[in-house]
Image (cartoon, rainbow, N blue to C red):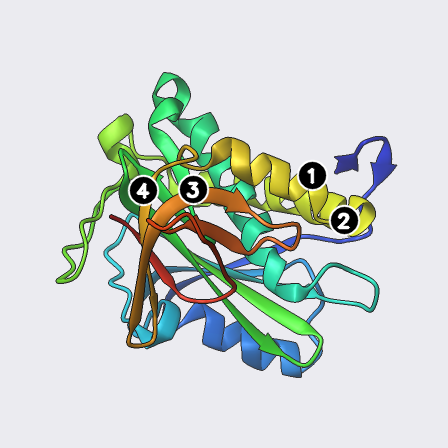
Amino acid sequence: MDYGGRASPVLIQIRTVEETGSTNADLLTAACAGAPEGTWLRAERQSQGRGRTGRGWQSPRGNLYASTIVHVHPGEPTPATLALVTAVALHETAAAWAGTEARRLSIKWPNDLLANGIKLAGVLLEREGDAVVIGLGVNLAEAPSLPDRATIALSALGAAPDPAAFLEDLTQSLARWIARWRGEGLAPIRAAWLAAAHPIGTALQAALGDEKIEGLFEGLDAEGALRLRRADGAIVTIHAGDVFLA
């Protein structure tokens, strides 16, 4: 693998299982046991898949359920910004498979991938010591029916990719962007994220516990936090919370 002329020190190893409870849970255990960065686990099906804030994640066959380990080190950007890195890599990979329909894809803060404004994929980051486990659920063939939001599959934009083939491309893209995150800092990640995001001025609603904030998308601050412009013109910076298209 090549990163701008220099070899990657990370060896990518993908293991696929027929079924597991949660690929994230499995790799959190593996990370505690010393599993190296570049370890990937893909499941054909998950029985206990989960999203952010403990939401369940349905796992019909034909979609992608995978997790990987990244070991963070002093001097690197904050681990939370790996959410932005992952979103950029996920968008890049899905856009390549979508071809001429890639224009329908966009990112919603911090790491949801949308197609036609509808959720196509999600990312869950969990940390154990210096290991961050990044879990990805991508609707390739089928869009699960959820009670609180609409979903869409990449098959709505064309043929459904084979999960193993999609993951091969995603591992390469994520490794490239992580190398840039480490070598160049957050700035190029932030620029790529903004280029792939919904337009400035998009109406959003942020749920911060019991508080809801509505405003217009004003981009990201230098650290990757979401900026919303409220009706009174004030800019609110959001570091954590659930965000929805209003």
- Choose top left, top right, bottom left or bottom right for residue 40: bottom right
* Nearer to the camera, 190 or 62: 190
CA–CA distance in space, label 4 to label 2:
31 Å
CA–CA distance in space, label 3 to label 2:
20 Å
Q: Residue at x 59, y 53 (%)?
A: 224
Residue assigned mark 2: 185
Residue assigned mark 4: 140
Left or right of residue 222, residue 40 in this image: left
- Give the foreground label among 4 and 2: 2
CA–CA distance in space, label 1 to label 4:
28 Å
Q: Residues within 10 Å of mark 3 (few under 14, many from 20)?
A: many
Residue assigned mark 3: 107
Mark linked to residue 188: 1
Q: Position of residue 125 (x, y in %)?
A: 52, 66
Between discs 1 and 4, the one toward the N terminus: 4
- Choose top left, top right, bottom left or bottom right for residue 120: top left
Q: Position of residue 246 (x, y in %)?
A: 24, 48
